[in-house]
Amino acid sequence: MPASDALTEARTHLVEARAALRDMREHTASLEALAGDRLSGEFLKQTLYRRMMSLRDDPSTPLFFGRIDYRAATGADEDEDCWIGRLHVTREMGSEPMVYDWRAPVALPFYRASRTEPMGVALRRRFGFSQGAITAFEDEQLTGSGPGDDSFGHSEILEAEIERPRTGPMRDIVATIQPEQDLIVRAPLDTSVVVQGAPGTGKTAVGLHRAAYLLYAYRDQLSRSGVMVVGPNASFLSYIGDVLPALGEIDAVQETLESLVARTAGRPVAATDEAHSAVLKGDARMATVLHRAVWESIVEPAETLVVPRGSAQWRVPAHRCGAVIDELRGRGVRYSAGRDMLAQRLAHQVLLRMEASGDSPDDRVQNAVARSAPVKAFVNAHWPALDAVKLVHRLLTDADFLARNADGVLDGAEQELLLIRPGRGVRVPRSATAWEPTLADLVLVDEASDLLNRTPSLGHVIIDEAQDLSPMGLRALGRRASTGSITVLGDLAQATTAYATTSWADALGHLGKPASSITELVAGFRVPRSVIAYAARLLPSIAPSLTPPHSVRRSAGDFRIVSGAAGLVDAVGAALAREGTVGVIVADAAVADAAGALTAAGVPFAHLADERGADEFRRLEVVPATLAKGLEFDHVVLIEPAAIVAAEPDRVTGLRRLYVCLTRAVSSLAIVHGNPLPAELDAA
């Protein structure tokens, strides 16, 4: 078929597919929620609403991006041309699909078919788009001879899509998923994986597309158990927030560790720990201390339980009550569940004595005895109710209580470091109500809460930037997938917290998933070749065990170093003269200076940390170095690398922070400095 005819065919198909999608949405909107009761009716309304929202069409985004031609001659069951896109579109209910959802099994060869394994496909076609309109196409012949013999060779359309300027938050990569990425995306639900990904390898996008795939392939199961994406901070969640809705998925929950533990504690983070204190509070040994502190509360019975009923008094000896308590503890139940069960177990002991005397009590009698004042008083005295916030507050303010439960686990100096003392820059709270907890404190509260009442498990949890979590933070997220699976995303070379992990095997142990597989992605699609090569000079100092990344893009990108601190405004002006987003990344302490220089030059900008509307797009943003992780900009102006390194508590952490900042650019990077560059950036 001539190229002009192929383009005409594709454009016609796009128009018809958009019309069909509009009909699908209108049909869904017209449906009435008829149910047998009000609760079922509300549930059905929500289901119809979510379905209608998933069928939204964005005219600026292509409804399909490729086509695969199955042919019987190459092993397919029949000849069929399948258009591959973001949503499943049919012309009429029950009719042949016009567009197949990229997650459907029939679409798999679009990502994985090769000349050596065509998977029944004779031809793979990619479409180029501009503002939702088809502009070009490329064909890859997977059998026979002719154009496209290098089926895994260079693709102009694919590279153009990767390098397309950013015009807002993160977008999906569904049109550019590579075979090694697709293997991770389509891993079964019961498989937990770690993705060690160098900058620009698409690990965050892979994780989000895995969420979309799992919600599609295991919808019935996950509609009940749920999917959660955990990001490092609220700015990051804002950046990735549009990806899943663009793929038709609006049911995944997006959280940060801070939002999760603050919800558990019922209070926000109100203070900040010094690094050495945060490291100790995040140490996995704190789980043992908390476990002791919870179960220390149980008191061994020393007196007989006496329960009056009618004219009789029923007695349960202290040793028998103690045996009941020991039996419950030995069952491994949560503390609060054991407390609830104790009243019934004691009441059962009373019923046994009633029966031995010739009485015939039933369950109503047992329940009444369990609710009686003597039994309640016994339970309160020997298995008292606990509050997680008050427990952790006591542990951090009561030296004797801490010493009893940390004996043999933490030494004296560590115990002293944990205690809230006057003169450490924090106010000593008189009560748990007046306590202003740090994030590490609330993670401890979350651990204590789980000891009291089991944390509900989700079906799948995706954890991004996981290398920056403490062991206790990893435990907090791991128990939210205790019966589900996880996808862990991160890069050990980008670990920038004082308590960051140095081993994925260790991290998996804290997450409770030690048997998970670890995949390393080193082929970069986002960061230009010259930029990633320059940043990789830091790897011998920050992560010598990792494989150095490489860029698969032919373009080296625009990389330059500008001497002289006064070059900020000129570098920003040059970046703004090009299409796409611009990020000015600067050490946190220098944000005000950078903002002042831009204001004086009359250059409009925004602060990354400022609140924004859901649809607000910012062309130029000033980005504190500590918030740059996970973000990407078409053009980056990096100010004073040495200051970014010096701002961290140690040099290795500072160099890792710099590595993060150097690798945020998609098209160009300009380094502006007045002070000498870190020696580690010198060419080897």
Image: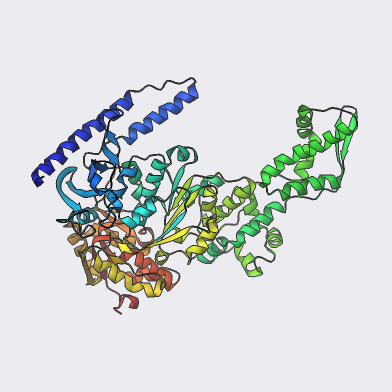
Quadrant of the rendered image containing residue 31? top left
Specify whether 469 is left or right of 82. right
User: In this orientation, which residue lies closer to the viewer: 41 or 283?
Assistant: 41
Q: Residue at the location (42% across, 39% down)?
A: 219
Q: What residue occupies the far front of the structure in this picture?
A: 73
Q: Residue at the location (40% across, 22% down)?
A: 33
Q: Position of residue 545 (x, y in %)?
A: 42, 72
Q: Residue at the location (77% across, 44% down)?
A: 381
Q: Position of residue 290 (x, y in %)?
A: 64, 56
Looking at the image, residue 565 lies above or below residue 633: below
The quadrant of the picture occupied by the C terminus is bottom left
Specify whether 635 is left or right of 406. left
Looking at the image, residue 353 lies above or below residue 512: above
Specify whether 483 is left or right of 316. left
**Residue 171 in sight from this viewpoint:** no
Give the colour scheme of this rendering. rainbow
Q: Position of residue 83 (x, y in %)?
A: 24, 42
The quadrant of the picture occupied by the N terminus is top left
User: In this orientation, which residue lies closer to the viewer: 314 or 96?
Assistant: 96
Looking at the image, residue 68 lies above or below residue 42: below
Quadrant of the rendered image containing residue 212? top left
